[in-house]
Image (cartoon, grey):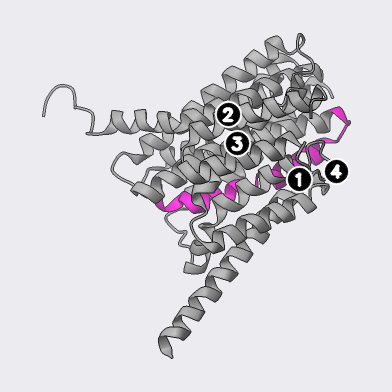
């Protein structure tokens, strides 16, 4: 792509993002959601974030489902979920999850597991 | 009153707390910024273009998809469509938070909309749910936005610089930081069975639909999860009403 096209791509992407994020706030004075929609929106955090991460955990290569105890993403994900469930603390969840992930990866890649 | 107007009470506190609440998100986003900067540079984008994306598009997932699509020689329209579908989730975020920005002027609303990301949404949804709004809550929100924005731009730039030296940086597994962060957000939010059902449905559908173009599986998974959670909640409510009546 030429520099002009790259520039167009960026401007277009920026405008699309704005067109998604802005209107609800812009017209906030006129937007009142019915109770059913309000209740549906309460499910947004747990559904959207889960839909982002579960495929990353179960499909490490992006193609085949790997439900295997040697899948570092799966094992570290389960450990992180358990820690978060028990203590509700974000930083320990991140740090221990990452530590387990890199340890598992090293064990699997060096043939020890 | 003459002279300097004192800061409204709690303003500095809101800013500081917004930054502290966002710090874990910034830490987990840094590898993504780094990998994006390196990957985009390795794919032949100029430093100006890479920084332009992080500063003006400010959407990690869409930026990654755009670079990958560029690499496969996709047309501009395809890249724009992918951005649209991938980021429609932000519409749900804005709808979830709108009650708390309605009282602000349009300049504030524009900024808080333009800078709304997955991470800031997670931070703000939690804050409003646990503490409600408050006179200066929008400063908490703005601090979260700017923390993410500066962090993203900075690490993109570092990625641009190191990009040529660490070409395999995308294979280091650093992106797992985002996975554990989101796990740490989702688990405490699973407060009743409808939320569990919603999350399990969303994860399953997103995984089954992973091969769909434009990451459509993400949107379908989220919508299916919302529908399932809402249905179970409604069923439980009706059953409770039925028990009370009998």
Q: Which residue is mark 3?
A: B180
Judging depth in this view, the residue of B186 and B219 nearest the camera is B186
| Labels 1 & 3 near each other (Cβ < 8 A) | no
Q: Which residue is mark 2?
A: B28
Residue occupying the point 74% across, 19% down: B169
Indicate which disc residue B215 carries: 1
Residue occupying the point 63% across, 65% down: B228
Q: Quadrant of the C terminus of chain B?
A: bottom left
Judging depth in this view, the residue of B46 and B203 nearest the camera is B203
Closer to the chain start, of discs 2 and 1, is: 2
Crowding near the residue tagged with mark 4, few <14, some 14–19, many ≥20 C-alpha atoms within 10 Å = few
Residue at disc 4, secondary structure? loop
User: Which one is in front in this view, the residue at disc 2 or the one at disc 3?
Assistant: 3
Task: Indicate left or right for A87 with B38 as reference.
Answer: left
Toward which corner of the image does residue B53 lie, by quadrant? Answer: top right
* Residue range corresponding to the magenta coloring: B71-100
């Amino acid at each position: 792509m030429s520099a002009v096209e790259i520039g167009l791509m960026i401007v277009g992407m920026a405008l699309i993002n704005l067109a998604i994020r802005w209107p609800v706030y812009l017209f906030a004075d006129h937007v009142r959601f019915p109770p059913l929609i309000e209740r549906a929106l309460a499910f947004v955090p747990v559904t959207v974030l889960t839909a982002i991460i579960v495929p990353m955990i179960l499909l490490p290569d992006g193609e085949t489902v790997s439900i295997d105890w040697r899948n570092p993403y799966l094992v570290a994900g389960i450990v992180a979920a358990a820690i978060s469930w028990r203590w509700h603390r974000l930083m320990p969840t991140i740090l221990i999850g990452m530590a387990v992930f890199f340890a598992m990866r090293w064990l699997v890649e060096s043939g020890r597991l | 009153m003459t002279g300097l107007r004192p800061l409204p009470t709690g303003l500095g506190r809101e800013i500081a707390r917004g930054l502290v609440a966002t710090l874990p998100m910034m830490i987990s986003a840094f590898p993504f910024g780094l990998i994006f900067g390196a990957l985009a540079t390795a794919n032949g984008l100029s430093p100006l273009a890479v920084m332009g994306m992080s500063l003006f598009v400010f959407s990690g997932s869409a930026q990654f998809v755009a670079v990958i699509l560029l690499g496969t020689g996709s047309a501009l329209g395809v890249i724009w469509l992918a951005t649209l579908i991938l980021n429609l989730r932000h519409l749900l975020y804005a709808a979830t938070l709108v009650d708390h920005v309605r009282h602000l002027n349009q300049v504030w609303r524009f900024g808080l909309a333009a800078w709304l990301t997955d991470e800031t949404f997670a931070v703000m949804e939690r804050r409003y749910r646990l503490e409600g709004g408050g006179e200066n809550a929008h400063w908490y929100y703005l601090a979260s936005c700017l923390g993410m924005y500066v962090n993203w731009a900075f690490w993109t730039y570092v990625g641009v610089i190191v990009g040529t030296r660490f070409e395999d940086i995308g294979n280091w597994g650093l992106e797992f930081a985002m996975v554990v962060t989101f796990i740490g957000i989702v688990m405490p939010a699973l407060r009743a069975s409808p939320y569990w059902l919603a999350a399990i449905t969303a994860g399953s559908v997103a995984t089954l639909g992973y091969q769909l173009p434009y990451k459509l599986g993400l949107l379908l998974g989220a919508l299916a999860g919302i529908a399932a959670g809402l249905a179970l909640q409604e069923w439980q409510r009706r059953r409770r009403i039925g028990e009370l009546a009998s």
